Image (spheres, rainbow, N blue to C red):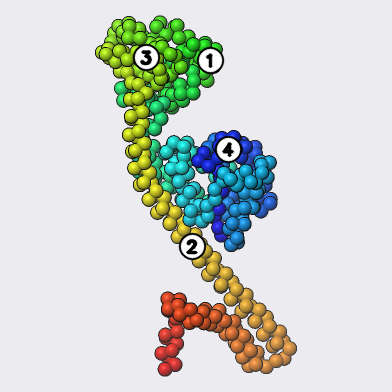
């Protein structure tokens, strides 16, 4: 049985194509049913996120390229795309390479942001969806369990996810260093763009309850505030609310500073000099550089954070090397299980075939006895046919070993059939 991993991701395909190939919950169910009904795979799991769509399929047969091509054609047809367009941006892995790719994906090593943790939950959900729809058997069941095991090990035994690798996340992590806990702090977010929205999500994950969103356009501030259960204010209202803020994070497109030294100084007096943490993610700056001169005002710029991010990326890269080794070890463990499973199947098939042949000969012998044929002749014929059958495969294997001068195979057969003992007895 062959494992095929077919997909596109942020490295190989533009977002316009990724959008067309993505599966929503409803289309995912239809796709899994289609794979099952059209027998495109014996077992299959579809992983679909904003950055990737991948199919992991277990197949029978030896025509790997043909099976991968058929799977790619099915994917293109399902989304009403040309097969050519998909082929230009897709990738395919087989067997060991497919196993290691899956483990790298689940561990966050193939993500847009190295080590991001969300992908593991997405892979688990994809597996559960496929299992619920009856397209997961023992093969993929065991493979995904190995995958989840190594992803957990990578997460707990390396620093792959411990360091901030975006300025938005880094700003929140810095705030945690100054305030041991963030759930009691009041945060003022200045701006309502993508960066501030990302900062807000990270703050919510840290348990922040008190959020204010200030923006030049109140409607836009209210839109973001509504999603965050926050209070919306205008930029003109910042001076009257600044003293309430323990943390200020700003990212706007303003050409002039919005928060000056004097404004912060007044706020600190009102706060009785309780510390204030300020992060300026804007270029040009939103917060005057002189604010850093004030006692109890801790100001960081995007350059400060970028330096931290670069150091953390290096840390994650180092952790990724350790993670790669874990993945290799775990993929070998899965391969060993797969081989043991195939060995068990081979032994079972050999025994069943031998048993079937013996039963057929027994039925034939019984018929001959019923027809009045002497028992000695029946037994002699049955013994001859059974011995011929049992000797056929080993004899063929021995001839192959001799013709190829394969000493290792020859010795294996000698040991398996105890030929040395047989020869010594005859001598």
Residue 66 in the image: above or below residue 231 = below
Label 1 and label 4: CA atoms lie apart by 29 Å
- Which residue is denoted by mark 1 in the rendering? 220
Q: Which of label 3 and label 2 is nearer to you?
A: 3
Label 2 and label 4: CA atoms lie apart by 36 Å
Image quadrant containing the N terminus: bottom right
Image quadrant containing the C terminus: bottom left
Tag 4 or tag 1, which sits nearer the N-term? 4
- Which residue is denoted by mark 4 in the rendering? 18
Q: Nearer the viewer, residue 424 or 87?
A: 87
Label 3 and label 1: CA atoms lie apart by 21 Å
Is 10 positioned to the left or the right of 282 in the image? right
Tag 4 or tag 2, which sits nearer the N-term? 4
Q: Which mark is residue 287?
A: 3
Label 2 and label 1: CA atoms lie apart by 59 Å
Give how far across and how far down residue 417 sits, in percent.
47, 80
Q: Which of label 2 and label 1 is nearer to you?
A: 1
Give how far across and how far down residue 276 sits, in percent.
32, 15
| Residue pictured at 70% horizontal, 92% vertical | 373
Q: Which mark is residue 282?
A: none
Residue 243 in the image: above or below residue 380 = above
Is 257 positioned to the left or the right of 81 in the image? left
């Amino acid at each position: 049985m062959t494992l095929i991993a077919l997909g596109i991701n942020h490295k190989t395909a533009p977002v316009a194509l990724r959008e067309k190939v993505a599966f929503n919950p409803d289309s995912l169910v239809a796709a899994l049913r289609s794979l099952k009904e059209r027998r495109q795979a014996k077992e299959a799991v579809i992983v679909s996120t904003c950055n990737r769509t991948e199919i992991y399929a277990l197949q029978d047969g030896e025509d790997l390229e043909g099976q991968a091509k058929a799977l790619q054609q099915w994917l293109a047809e399902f989304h009403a795309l040309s097969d050519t367009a998909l082929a230009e941006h897709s990738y395919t892995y087989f067997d060991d390479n497919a196993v290691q790719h899956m483990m790298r994906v689940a561990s966050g090593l193939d993500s847009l942001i190295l080590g991001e943790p969300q992908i593991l939950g997405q892979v688990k959900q994809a597996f559960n969806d496929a299992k619920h729809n009856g397209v997961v058997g023992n093969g993929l069941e065991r493979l995904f369990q190995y995958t989840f095991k190594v992803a957990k090990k990578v997460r707990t035994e390396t620093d792959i996810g411990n360091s901030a690798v975006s300025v938005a996340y880094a700003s929140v992590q810095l705030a945690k260093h100054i305030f041991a806990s963030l759930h009691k702090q009041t945060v003022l977010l200045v701006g309502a763009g993508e960066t501030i929205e990302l900062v807000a999500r990270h703050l919510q994950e840290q348990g922040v309850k008190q959020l204010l969103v200030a923006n030049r356009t109140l409607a836009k501030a209210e839109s973001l505030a509504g999603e965050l259960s926050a209070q919306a204010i205008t930029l003109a209202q910042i001076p009257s609310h600044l003293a309430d803020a323990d943390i200020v994070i700003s990212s706007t497109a303003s050409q002039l500073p919005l928060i000056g030294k004097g404004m912060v100084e007044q706020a600190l007096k009102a706060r009785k000099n309780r510390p204030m943490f300020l992060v300026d993610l804007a270029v040009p700056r939103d917060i005057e550089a002189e604010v850093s001169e004030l006692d109890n005002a801790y100001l960081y710029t995007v350059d400060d954070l970028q330096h931290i991010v670069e150091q953390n990326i290096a840390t994650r890269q180092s952790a990724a090397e350790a993670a790669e080794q874990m993945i290799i070890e775990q993929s070998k463990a899965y391969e060993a299980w797969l081989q043991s499973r195939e060995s068990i199947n081979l032994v079972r098939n050999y025994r069943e075939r031998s048993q079937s042949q013996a039963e057929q000969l027994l039925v034939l012998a019984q018929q001959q006895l019923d027809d009045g044929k002497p028992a000695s002749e029946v037994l002699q014929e049955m013994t001859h046919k059974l011995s011929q059958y049992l000797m056929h495969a080993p004899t063929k294997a021995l001839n192959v070993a001799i013709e190829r001068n394969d000493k290792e195979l020859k010795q294996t057969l000698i040991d398996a059939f105890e030929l040395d003992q047989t020869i010594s007895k005859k001598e």
